[in-house]
Image (cartoon, rainbow, N blue to C red):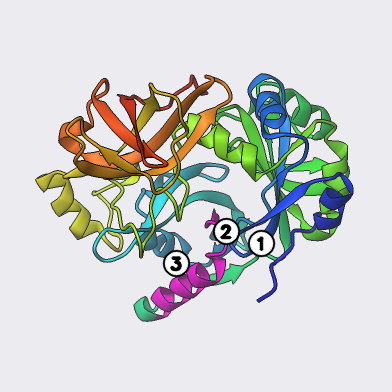
Amino acid sequence: MPLQTPPLRGIHDDRGAKFTEFGGWDMPVEFDSIQTEHAAVREDVGIFDVSHMGQIHVTGTDATELMQRLTSNDVRRLEVGDSQYAAITDEEGIIIDDTVVYRLPADGGDPTYLFVPNAGTDEATHERWIGYRNEWDLEATVDNRTDEYAMFAVQGPKAAELVATLADEPVDELDRFEARYATIDDVTCWTARTGYTGEDGFELIVPWPEAERIWSLFECQPCGLGARDTLRIEAGFLLAGQDFDHESDPRTPYEAGIGFTVDLETEFVGRDALERVNEAGIEEELVGFQLIDRGIPRHGYDITNTDSRVVGTVTSGTMSPSLEKPIGLGYVPIEYAEPGTTLQIIVRGQSKKARVETTPFIDTV
């Protein structure tokens, strides 16, 4: 099956980007270098094309109830312009995906939402919403608009200043996880103060035909998925399909360290199972760690205790450009999860000393 391409594929190619397959999309992984792009976001501002992320639009009389029943957080708390991070779980409380839910202005008087599933999952997520809507006989329209809109992330300590200079509305007045429609060069963009880097910034949802026009206005460092990965690991953020996977590495929100997204006062698919997990406690959890010895941890590497017994697996790892130290994430039994605990990471057959650290690894907004 051919890869899907973002609207700016040709622009990125002309800029000299290197590409990689991600979630069924042909995406830029690097423009100049991961280190250059990473530093731009930590110190100044950079822009990412994240048009591979899904976009599902839900509206109708029962839109709130449908969203409430299919995400783990309390959607009813959202006012227009608010957003929240949530998990999508199955009946056993296992994470299928993580997502951000936005409350949009009402469509014809009905509550309206946009939520962003991860790359390559939009079709399955759309079908899930349609299936449950029909099963529960709810009045809601569910549209997959992934191919109608581009999505850009402008991130870094100077991101707010840059976006504010281009938008007709005072978007720099938005708080974290707030959003509004803003006009940029006569194009209406959903502009949210959200991101995946640990820095301040905005994510802009732009009509697909206007993608090139809006992208060209942002005179800052273009960044690829390589820097996006190093940035999010430093911030301790999960990557779907890597730090959890519904089939190969099933995890609950409590194990994955996002128990804060679970509101047990609401009714949603998986709620009863998660209440039982919350009461019984978990046996393993995701931790951050830093290698003390020379080496770089990678996804799939074994984690052992000091007696060389395998106790876990690395899910994400990198050489941190900010810290200039090798860091990673991985699941271990709770008796090894205390910060300061000594572990070993098996790097290319060699045992490397590591220490459990609190996450995020860096200061974040």
Quick one: SS at disc 1? Answer: strand
| Residue 37 appears in the figure | yes
Q: Tell me the residue at 56%/40% (across/down).
A: 229
In depth, the one of 40 and 121 nearer the eye is 40
Query: Residue 231 at what x, y percent from top left?
Result: 56, 33
Q: Is residue 86 left or right of residue 218?
A: left
Residue 324 left/right relative to 184: left
Q: Amino acid at mark 1?
A: Trp
- Residue 1 placement: quadrant: bottom right
Count neighbours of disc 2 (C-alpha within 10 A) and say few if under 14, some if 14 to 19, many if 20 or more: some
Which label lies toward us, 1 or 3?
1
- Residue 224 versus residue 354 in the image, above or below: below
User: From where the camera sits, is residue 196 visible?
Assistant: no
Q: Secondary structure at mark 3?
A: loop
Q: Give the residue number, with chain letter if any, for mark 3.
A: 62
Residue 222 occupies which quadrant of the picture?
Answer: top right
Q: CA distance from mark 3 to mark 2?
A: 26 Å
- Label located before the other in sequence (3 or 2): 3
- Say if the magenta span includes residue 206: no
Q: Residue at x 10, y 47 (%)?
A: 280
Reading the image, the residue beneath label 2 is 119
Percent of width and height locating residue 94: 30, 58
The reply, left or right, for residue 180 in relation to residue 261 is right
Q: Which mark is residue 25?
A: 1
On screen, residue 44 above or below 351: above
Does the CB distance between marks 2 and 1 fall below 8 Å?
yes
